[in-house]
Image: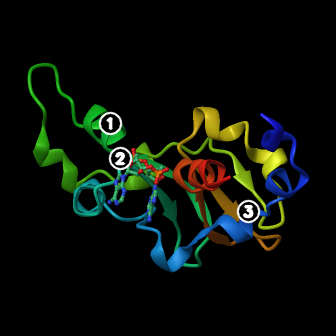
Amino acid sequence: MKFLHSEKFLDMKAENLMIPLERVAHVQSKNNLEHALLVLTKSGYTAIPVLDYHDRLHGLISTPLIMEAILGLERIEFEKLESILVEEVMNKNIPRIRPESTLHQYLHLLVDHPFICIENDAGFFEGIVTRRVVLDLLTKH
Ligand code: 2BA
């Protein structure tokens, strides 16, 4: 696996592999779960970033997290979707990388996370790096 030791591959900066904010499906922390489920379903993704009105990253919301939140003792309580906010349910404990982070600094994160969020020095969300983009690059070599 000569290529894995290649400087060029592991030196790739996150900003050069990034799916930018304007192409990332996302929701806002004050949205309710009904809206989040709609965006997740329409986009086809299982998990997406949660931002605030200033494009700062707050966490991730996923279909399993939403389902868990509305799971009652005997049934799924869909009527709860409207009254629960994304910020009450989202996962806040997520890795963040800088636009200038190189692949050798964050490749290991993609083992457990299908995508990694990119945040700039000012704390604003810039986009994501996905497993697909990195694996696609690898297979091209
Ligand atoms: P998942 O939604 O679980 O998707 C797993 C993989 O399935 C994706 O891997 C992609 O190869 C494929 N896939 C799912 N939905 C797709 C769609 N609507 N269009 C095209 N391909 C689709 P990755 O591309 O490596 O993405 C990894 C994870 O990153 C996704 O996991 C999703 O949570 C997130 N993601 C990727 N692109 C996104 C975007 N534009 N906006 C928001 N989240 C995104």
Q: Position of residue 80 (x, y in %)?
A: 18, 46
Q: Which mark is in front, 1 or 2? A: 2
Residue density around tag 1, few if under 14, some if 14–19, many if 20 or more, within 10 Å: few
In the image, is 83 to the left or to the right of 79? right
Q: Position of residue 47 (x, y in %)?
A: 41, 49
**Residue 27 versus residue 76 in the image, above or below:** below
In the image, is 43 to the left or to the right of 108? left
The residue pinned by badge 2 equals: 46
Task: Find out whether the residues at labels 1 and 2 contact each other: C-beta distance under 8 Å.
Answer: yes
Q: Nearer the viewer, residue 20 or 95?
A: 20
Element at label 1: helix
| Amino acid at pointer 2 | Thr
Residue density around tag 2, few if under 14, some if 14–19, many if 20 or more, within 10 Å: few
In the image, is 85 to the left or to the right of 54? left
Q: CA distance from mark 1 to mark 3?
A: 28 Å
The residue pinned by badge 3 equals: 14
Which circle's residue, 1 or 3, is located before the other in the chain?
A: 3
The residue pinned by badge 1 equals: 64
Element at label 3: helix
